[in-house]
Amino acid sequence: SVPRRNSGESVPHHVEGQGHADTALDAASASSAALEETYYAEYLRPPSRLSSSDWVDSIKSLPRSRVLYRIRHPLLSMTLMAVVASIWHCVFEMPGLATLSAHTLLGSALSLLLVFRTNSAYQRFQEGRKIWNDIL
């Protein structure tokens, strides 16, 4: 008898001599799928929530940070200039700016803009991650 699919149509039998090749192909694709599943398993599971110990571990790993290593010279020079300006301001009792209201308003507006842009970028990233997860 000819095996039938759920829709009722018949499934053709293997042509003589191709059965071994199909079995090897099925085994190779199953092996490849298992390899991909283990390789991408980290990316396919939902993200876990961070705990306070994760933040402590991140702070402890800062001295080994490659990014921090690459920006160390500009970071140190800007920090040094800020310290010198602060000391200069305190030692010579330089007066502050007459009004800071414009800078305060501008800073508040820019911070809100930055928060909204970061939030929308994160939402786009999450949506892309979900779509990529569906593709894989």
Image (tube, rainbow, N blue to C red):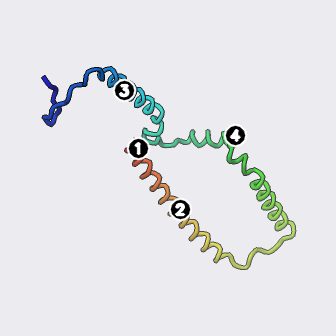
Dot 4 or dot 1, earlier in sequence: 4
Is 17 or 112 nearer to us in this picture? 17
- Residue drawn at (44%, 33%) of the image: 36
User: Residue 74: x and y, percent?
Assistant: 76, 55
Dot 1 or dot 3, earlier in sequence: 3
Circle count: 4
Is 22 or 67 nearer to us in this picture? 22
Mark nearest the camera among 4 and 1 is: 1
What amino acid type is highlighted by mark number 1? Asn
- Residue drawn at (25%, 24%) of the image: 15
Q: Callout 3: few (<14), some (14-19), or many (20+) C-alpha neighbours within 10 Å?
A: few
Callout 4 secondary element = helix
- Residue drawn at (30%, 23%) of the image: 18
- Find the distance from the CA under tag 3 to the CA under tag 4: 46 Å
Question: Which image quarter: residue 66?
Answer: top right
Is 31 or 116 nearer to us in this picture? 31
Task: Give me the disc on residue 133.
Answer: 1
Callout 1 secondary element = helix
Mark nearest the camera among 4 and 2 is: 4
Task: Give me the disc on residue 55.
Answer: none
Mark nearest the camera among 3 and 2 is: 3
What residue did someone put label 3 on? 25
- Find the distance from the CA under tag 1 to the CA under tag 2: 27 Å
What residue did someone put label 4 on? 64
What amino acid type is highlighted by mark number 3? Leu
What residue did someone put label 2 on? 115
Q: Callout 4: few (<14), some (14-19), or many (20+) C-alpha neighbours within 10 Å?
A: few
